Image (cartoon, rainbow, N blue to C red):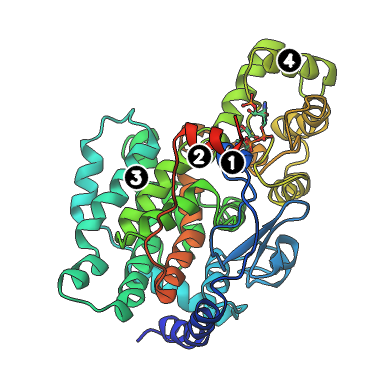
Amino acid sequence: MDPIKQKFVEVALPRVAEFRKLLADHSEKVIGEITIGQVLTGMKGMVSLLCDTSKLDPEEGIRFRGYSIPELRERLPKRNPEGEPLPEGLFYLMLLNELPTREDVDALSREWASRSDLPDYVYKILDAFPTDTRPMVQFSTAILAMAKDSKFMAAYLDGMGKKEHWDQTYEDVMDLIARLPRIAAYIYRRMYHGNKQIDPDPSLDWAANLAHMMGFDNYEVHRLMRLYMFLHSDHEGGNVSAHTTHLVGSALSNPYYAYAAGMTGLAGPLHGFANQEVIRWMFNMIKEIGPACDDKEKIRKYIMQQIEDGKVIPGYGHAVLRKTDPRFTAQLEFGQKYLPDDPWLITMTCLFEVVPEVLVGISKIKNPWPNVDAGSGVLLMHYGIKEFDFYTVLFGVSRALGVLASLCWDRAYGLPIERPTSHPLDWFKKQAGM
Ligand code: CMX
């Protein structure tokens, strides 16, 4: 058994015993009330999911297994002391609830490299798409196609017992994460670089290899890609991509089905698609008001007009957060350190000053502050990854780390199929005495 899998068994056994005891002794304990408003407006704040990998605090932002982003940027292993954490380390932490050593992380890099070959039919399927097919359509299809070789599915059909479910889920999860950079880079090179593909470099880590295969072979892009893959990985269990992966997984659908479903949710403009929308939106703004990077008055007028026209300002607002997203702050700090004079960064900083001032005046908006998507595209643009239609794929590669670590835990706990109750409108009217 590979050492990470062995460790997972050791960590999971006592936790699963606690889970069973909690369920056996305290099932009836009441932990909250549900209002009609919550049901009819997206179940916000309703406790309804178990997720160990990370927790989102509305005021502070995300913590991964209890660690904040600044803490992990300090403490997770890096390739260079002044660099960014290797995302392998964050996956290790989310899966095993333990900070890894550099050796642990290198072993995981090697494990993923050994599993990263794509079946030939995946290339053929991707080659069949017209090159102007949306990158997320290609990405989700490639993931779904690989369900053909799901080890979970094969073992299930072979009569695998319930106690073994976590084991084959782990195998699929490791294969899937290992292969994602290959899929993403293949789509990118085929769409934007005349299908001139680049072989992986076995000496590189998971994130740097993605940058390398996309054609970006310098330390700066590798450092940015490690940060990007770290920051977008997980945001507790209720966001659309995480919840969808979990929900579909609860039907014992194999990890390829579950994660592909999560990716089609990530592709929505209110979720991960917002990262590319931000750049499209900035281009439109610049087209209309001119390259007025730091002209706050012009920017303010433009934003007010957008709101009046009933449009959302992408990259701002959040369903849970009520302060500036620390993932945005990490990207802003990175930008101020390495590309302070970049005109896009100056525009982004200016938007950060102006947009919240405007949104705060609109009472229905609960959070006027920037989220992760307000900052990511500007950094990618600076280093030459300018094809913003592709950005949600990068978000998706990263999001695999969190949602698939969670899926391993779902199967270890043996969580049952998810099946909440629904009612017609008249039922709610009756509850309200209408
Ligand atoms: N610009 C304009 N209007 C906004 C807004 C924004 N950035 N954020 C919220 N609003 C509006 C909503 O559309 C809603 O209007 P209606 O009542 O007319 O439908 C109202 O304000 C209340 O919304 P809310 O309760 O504050 O926010 P929600 O929880 O409903 O939605 C989110 C959250 C993120 C979808 C929303 O803020 C938004 O659309 N933001 C822009 C898109 C974006 O950046 N999404 C990425 C989020 C992070 C991620 O998942 O990647």
Query: Dot 2: what SS?
Result: helix
Instruction: Tell me the crowding category of disc 3: few under 14, some 14 to 19, or many 20 or more residues within 10 angstroms, Cα based.
Output: many
- The span from disc 2 to disc 3 (Cα, nearest Å) is 14 Å
Q: Which residue is mark 4?
A: 302
Asked whether residue 11 is in view, the answer is: yes
Q: Nearer the viewer, mark 4 or mark 1?
A: 4
- For the residue marked with disc 3, what is the amino acid? Ser
Q: Nearer the viewer, mark 2 or mark 4?
A: 4
In the rendered structure, the answer to whether residue 195 lies left or right of residue 121 reads: right
Task: Using the image as rendered, state which of residue 157 and residue 117 is in the foreground.
Answer: 157
Q: Which residue is mark 1?
A: 380
Task: Using the image as rendered, state which of residue 289 and residue 353 is in the foreground.
Answer: 353
Say which mark, if any, is on residue 140: 3
Counting the numbered discs, the total is 4
Q: Nearer the viewer, mark 1 or mark 2?
A: 2
Task: Name the quadrant where ligand 1 sits.
Answer: top right
**Which mark is first along the chain, 1 or 4?**
4
Instruction: Tell me the crowding category of disc 1: few under 14, some 14 to 19, or many 20 or more residues within 10 angstroms, Cα based.
Output: some
